[in-house]
Image (cartoon, rainbow, N blue to C red):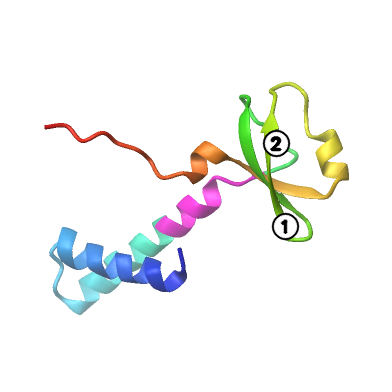
Amino acid sequence: MTREQIEKAGRDYALDQLGIVGLPGRAEAMKAFISGAQWRINSVWHSTDELPKYSGFLAVLMSNGLMEIMYYSAGIGFHEMTLKGYVLWAYISDLLPERKEETK
Protein backbone atom coordinates (compact mmCIF):
# COMPACT_ATOMS: atom_id res chain seq x y z
CA MET A 1 0.00 0.00 0.00
CA THR A 2 1.43 3.37 -0.98
CA ARG A 3 1.33 6.43 1.28
CA GLU A 4 -1.25 7.99 -1.06
CA GLN A 5 -3.50 4.94 -0.73
CA ILE A 6 -3.19 5.04 3.07
CA GLU A 7 -4.02 8.77 3.10
CA LYS A 8 -7.06 8.21 0.87
CA ALA A 9 -8.24 5.37 3.09
CA GLY A 10 -7.77 7.64 6.11
CA ARG A 11 -9.84 10.42 4.53
CA ASP A 12 -12.55 7.96 3.50
CA TYR A 13 -12.61 6.44 6.99
CA ALA A 14 -12.84 9.83 8.71
CA LEU A 15 -15.73 10.89 6.49
CA ASP A 16 -17.66 7.66 5.88
CA GLN A 17 -17.12 5.67 9.08
CA LEU A 18 -16.77 8.44 11.64
CA GLY A 19 -18.99 11.00 9.93
CA ILE A 20 -16.48 13.79 10.57
CA VAL A 21 -17.18 16.64 8.18
CA GLY A 22 -15.16 19.49 9.70
CA LEU A 23 -11.64 19.87 8.38
CA PRO A 24 -9.82 19.95 11.78
CA GLY A 25 -11.53 16.78 13.01
CA ARG A 26 -10.99 14.99 9.70
CA ALA A 27 -7.30 15.94 9.67
CA GLU A 28 -6.78 14.52 13.17
CA ALA A 29 -8.69 11.33 12.37
CA MET A 30 -6.69 10.95 9.16
CA LYS A 31 -3.37 11.37 11.03
CA ALA A 32 -4.44 8.73 13.55
CA PHE A 33 -5.48 6.35 10.76
CA ILE A 34 -2.16 6.82 8.91
CA SER A 35 -0.15 6.32 12.12
CA GLY A 36 -2.08 3.13 12.83
CA ALA A 37 -1.52 1.83 9.30
CA GLN A 38 2.22 2.55 9.49
CA TRP A 39 2.45 0.90 12.91
CA ARG A 40 0.67 -2.20 11.57
CA ILE A 41 3.04 -2.45 8.62
CA ASN A 42 6.17 -2.06 10.77
CA SER A 43 5.05 -4.10 13.78
CA VAL A 44 5.19 -7.48 12.02
CA TRP A 45 8.93 -7.28 11.25
CA HIS A 46 11.46 -8.72 13.72
CA SER A 47 15.24 -8.51 14.00
CA THR A 48 17.17 -11.74 13.41
CA ASP A 49 18.28 -11.42 17.06
CA GLU A 50 14.70 -12.41 17.96
CA LEU A 51 13.84 -16.03 17.24
CA PRO A 52 10.40 -17.00 15.95
CA LYS A 53 8.21 -18.53 18.64
CA TYR A 54 6.66 -21.16 16.37
CA SER A 55 7.40 -23.03 13.15
CA GLY A 56 6.04 -21.74 9.87
CA PHE A 57 6.73 -19.83 6.69
CA LEU A 58 8.66 -16.58 7.04
CA ALA A 59 9.40 -13.65 4.75
CA VAL A 60 13.06 -12.80 5.30
CA LEU A 61 14.57 -9.47 4.23
CA MET A 62 18.22 -9.53 3.22
CA SER A 63 20.72 -6.70 3.70
CA ASN A 64 20.82 -6.16 -0.09
CA GLY A 65 17.06 -5.42 -0.15
CA LEU A 66 15.98 -8.77 -1.61
CA MET A 67 13.43 -10.95 0.14
CA GLU A 68 13.12 -14.71 0.45
CA ILE A 69 10.38 -17.01 1.68
CA MET A 70 11.57 -19.83 3.91
CA TYR A 71 10.21 -22.42 6.30
CA TYR A 72 11.43 -22.10 9.87
CA SER A 73 11.43 -24.99 12.35
CA ALA A 74 11.23 -23.70 15.92
CA GLY A 75 14.36 -24.31 17.94
CA ILE A 76 16.92 -24.31 15.11
CA GLY A 77 17.84 -20.61 15.30
CA PHE A 78 19.00 -17.93 12.91
CA HIS A 79 22.77 -18.24 13.28
CA GLU A 80 23.29 -19.42 9.70
CA MET A 81 20.77 -16.86 8.45
CA THR A 82 22.62 -13.92 9.98
CA LEU A 83 25.78 -15.05 8.21
CA LYS A 84 23.90 -15.05 4.89
CA GLY A 85 22.97 -11.39 5.30
CA TYR A 86 19.40 -11.64 6.62
CA VAL A 87 18.35 -8.64 8.69
CA LEU A 88 14.56 -8.85 9.31
CA TRP A 89 11.88 -11.51 9.27
CA ALA A 90 8.09 -11.69 9.51
CA TYR A 91 5.61 -14.53 9.76
CA ILE A 92 3.84 -14.85 6.40
CA SER A 93 0.56 -15.17 8.32
CA ASP A 94 1.15 -11.67 9.78
CA LEU A 95 1.55 -10.21 6.29
CA LEU A 96 -1.69 -11.65 4.90
CA PRO A 97 -5.04 -9.91 5.29
CA GLU A 98 -7.18 -11.14 8.16
CA ARG A 99 -9.96 -13.44 7.04
CA LYS A 100 -13.07 -12.86 9.05
CA GLU A 101 -16.09 -14.93 8.20
CA GLU A 102 -19.23 -12.88 7.88
CA THR A 103 -22.02 -13.87 10.23
CA LYS A 104 -25.64 -13.49 9.26
Residue 74 vertical position relative to residue 63 in the rendered view, above or below: above
Q: Which residue is mark 2?
A: 50
Point 50% across, 40% down: residue:
94
Which residues, given as a range, are shown in magenta? 37-46
Residue at the limit of the structure toward the bottom, as seen here: 23
Where residue 36 appears, x then y in whole percent?
40, 56
Residue 44 located within the stretch drawn in magenta: yes
How far separated are the C-alphas under marks 1 and 2?
Answer: 20 Å
Residue at the limit of the structure toward the right, as seen here: 83
Q: In this rendered view, identify the residue nearer to me: 27 or 57.
A: 57
Q: In this rendered view, identify the residue nearer to me: 96 or 11.
A: 96
Q: Which residue is mark 1?
A: 66
Where residue 2 appears, x then y in whole percent?
46, 68
Mark 2 neighbour density, 10 Å: few (under 14) some (14–19) many (20 or more): few
Number of numbered discs overlaid on the protein picture: 2
Point 13% across, 73% down: residue:
21
Where residue 87 appears, x then y in whole percent?
75, 49
Q: Please, what is the three-letter code of the amino acid marked with disc 2?
A: Glu
Where residue 14 appears, x then y in whole percent?
22, 65
Mark 1 neighbour density, 10 Å: few (under 14) some (14–19) many (20 or more): few
User: Within the image, what quadrant is residue 12 found in?
Assistant: bottom left
Locate the C terminus and report the quarter of the image it occupies.
Answer: top left
Element on which disc 1 rests: loop
